[in-house]
Amino acid sequence: MRKSKELAFSYGFLLPSLSLTLILGIYPIAWAMRYMFYDYKGFGKKTFIGLDNFARVMRDGEFWHSVANTFAYAGGKLALSIPLALLLAVVLNRGLRGRHILRAVFFLPTIVSTAVMAVVFFAIFNAYNGVLNQFLLKYKLIGGAVDWLGADHAMLTVVLVSVWGAVGNYMLLFLAGLQNIPADVYESASLDGANKLQQFRYVTIPMLGPVMQMIVMLAIINALKGYESIMVLTDGGPIGKTNVMFLYVYKLFFPTAGTGAASQIQEMGYGSAVSFVTAIIVGLITALYYFGSKRMNRYA
C-alpha cells in the first residue's frame, strides 16, 4: 500500500512535464506525420496523394541546396566554437583575477534571446550605417563599405553570430570537465618531465574525452537545427546563400514575403514531408557521430 502511494506521488510530480511533452512534443509530431501523405495547404480540402510529397522532396533542388547550406553552416560553427570554448575554459580555469566575472560575461550570450541578439548584430553588420563598417571606415581599415550580409560574406557572418551565441555554453561544460580532473595527474606528469603543452596534449585532452563527446554531439544537433538568427539577419538570402533546412521548413508552414519558392505558398502537407526528411538527416548525422565516437573510445 505504501509503495503504491509513493508511486502515485512520483507520477503526480511527473504529470505536468509529461502533459507538456505530450501536448507540445508528441502531438505536433503525430499531426505532421498524418499530413505527410496529403496535399494540404492549411485550409480547405485535403487530398490523399500517398508518397507524392516524398517524391517531390527528392527532386526539390531548393531543399537540397538548403541541406548543403546547413552542412556548411554547421561545419563552420563547430570548427570555430568548440576550439574557442576549450581555449576559454582552459584560460579561465586558472587562478586569474576576475575569472568569475569573465565566465559570466562569456556565458551571458547563451541566455540572451536569439531574436534580440540577431537584431543587435543586424545593426552591427548593416552595410549602409552599420557599426562595424563605420568603425572600419573611421580608422581607414577598409576602402569602402562592406556588405557583410551580402552574397559574398553572408554565410561567414551568420556563422560568427552563431559562434558568439554558443561558445559560452560549451565553455561552461568544458570548465566542469576540467575541474573534475585530479591535480595529482598533472603533478605526476610534471614529475615525469612533461611541459604545459605536453600535459594539455596527453593529460587534459584524453581526460576530457567523455565531456568532449557530449559537447560535440550537442553542438552538432544545435548547429543542424539552428535557423532563428539566420531568419532575422538574412531570411535565408541573399539568393538562398544562407537558407538552411529548418528555415526552409519554417517557410513552408509560415510563408513570408521573402524570396524563394518556400516562402510564397503555405503547404502543410509538403512541409510535413520535408520536416520528416529533415529530422531523418539530423538523426542520421547524430547517430553516425555517436557510434563513431564510441568506437574510437573503444580503441583509444
Image (cartoon, rainbow, N blue to C red):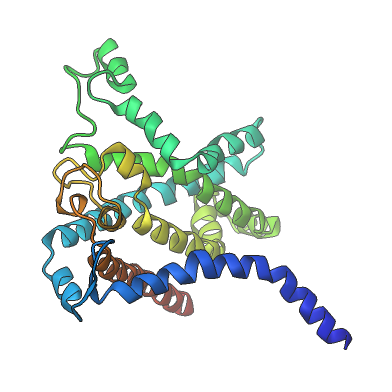
Say if residue 217 shows up in the picture. Answer: yes
Q: Quadrant of residue 155?
A: top left
Horizontal side of 17 relative to 287 (left or right) equals: right
Residue ID at (27%, 26%):
126
Residue ID at (25%, 77%):
37
Task: Find residue 262 and report its horizontal and vertical position in percent.
Answer: 19, 54
Task: Find residue 235 and report its horizontal and vertical position in percent.
Answer: 26, 42
Residue lying farthest to the bottom in this orientation: 1
Horizontal side of 89 relative to 77 (left or right) equals: right
Task: Tell how many labels.
Answer: 0
Say if residue 159 shows up in the picture. Answer: no
Residue ID at (72%, 75%):
11
- Please state, as top left, top right, bottom left or bottom right, where the N terminus lies in the image: bottom right
- Front residue (pair 268, 202): 268
Residue lying farthest to the top in this orientation: 138
- Front residue (pair 273, 298): 273
Task: Find residue 10 and report its horizontal and vertical position in percent.
Answer: 76, 74
Horizontal side of 107 relative to 219 (left or right) equals: right
Task: Find residue 214 and report its horizontal and vertical position in percent.
Answer: 51, 64
Vertical side of 233 occupied by 86: above or below: below
- Front residue (pair 10, 293): 10
Vertical side of 132 occupied by 22: above or below: below
Residue lying farthest to the front in this orientation: 44
Residue ID at (25%, 57%):
252
Q: Quadrant of residue 105?
A: top right
